[in-house]
Image (cartoon, grey):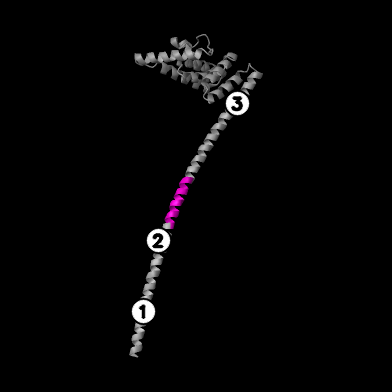
Amino acid sequence: MNSNHSTLVEQLQQLKQQGENSLKQQDQKFKTLVNELSDRVQNNKESFTLLNGKENELDQFYHQLESQLNKVEGVVETLQNIENFSQMIRTNPESAEAYYQRGLNHQKLGDKTGAMEDYTEALHLDSTYARAYHTRGVILAEIGNRKQAVEDLRLAAKYYFEQGDIESYEQARNLSKEFYEVRHSPVNTETAEVIDSQDEMSQEMNSAPMDLVTVGGLFDDETDSEENISILG
């Protein structure tokens, strides 16, 4: 019995050792597997982040393309409008409205010269066309010819008032006052000479290719009087 007992104890110790060794091996394998899975999860996270970034880039690129496409479509539509109004002018060369609408489309494309030429032609056909004076006055101010801009805007206000368009009348009148005040604001002599020189150059450049419609010095801003501006309130 003692001999059997010793044998059993040795066998139990061997089994225990084998079990512990087996558990250690399994534990090591499990740890290795967990580490591999953790690495895969991390790699997947990085891949997902990268893909998400690419998706955002593609989304931004898509919106840029969509925006550019809309701009191109807008330009094409504007060019088509110009062609349509040109056809109307060929059919009816006395249509001031056709010239005005074509001018608006030239202005939309940034073609200020073409726009002013059409506005001027519209005014040759209809010297009371308030909107043509208004839009031409704005362009004149943008290119630095404030003197003619003020005259155009005052004429626009005059005809808006006569036609009963009070809202547009007030807009044109306020713009004319704003440009007049800017042109006649107190500045030092050197700055004034520069502004006058720029205005003279602008007038020469703009008066050469087109005949601006005026009304006999009715609103000559060099000699403004209460009588001249009374119609503008």
Along the horizontal axis of the image, is 74 left or right of 39? right
Label 1 vs label 3, nearer the camera: 1
Is residue 1 positioned above or below 129 on the image? below
Disc 2 marks a residue whose amino acid type is: Asn
Q: Is residue 52 magenta?
A: yes
- Helix, strand or loop under label 2: helix
Can residue 147 be found in the magenta stretch?
Answer: no
Q: Alpha carbon of mark 2 to alpha carbon of mark 1: how far? A: 31 Å
Tell me the residue that label 2 is attached to. Answer: 35
Q: Quadrant of residue 34?
A: bottom left
Q: Amino acid at mark 3?
A: Asn
Foreground: 45 or 175?
A: 45
Q: Residue at x 56, y 29 (%)?
A: 75
Foreground disc of the pair 2, 1? 1
Read off the magenta span.
40-54
Q: Which mark is residue 81?
A: 3
Q: Is residue 87 above or below residue 36?
A: above
Q: Which residue is mark 1?
A: 14
Front residue of this view, candidates 187 and 28: 28
- Where residue 96 appears, as percent x and y from the top left, is 60, 18
Q: Amino acid under label 1?
A: Gln
Q: How dense is the environment of label 1, judged by Cα within 10 Å: few (below 14), some, or many (20 and up)? A: few
Is residue 108 placed above or below 58 in the rendered structure? above
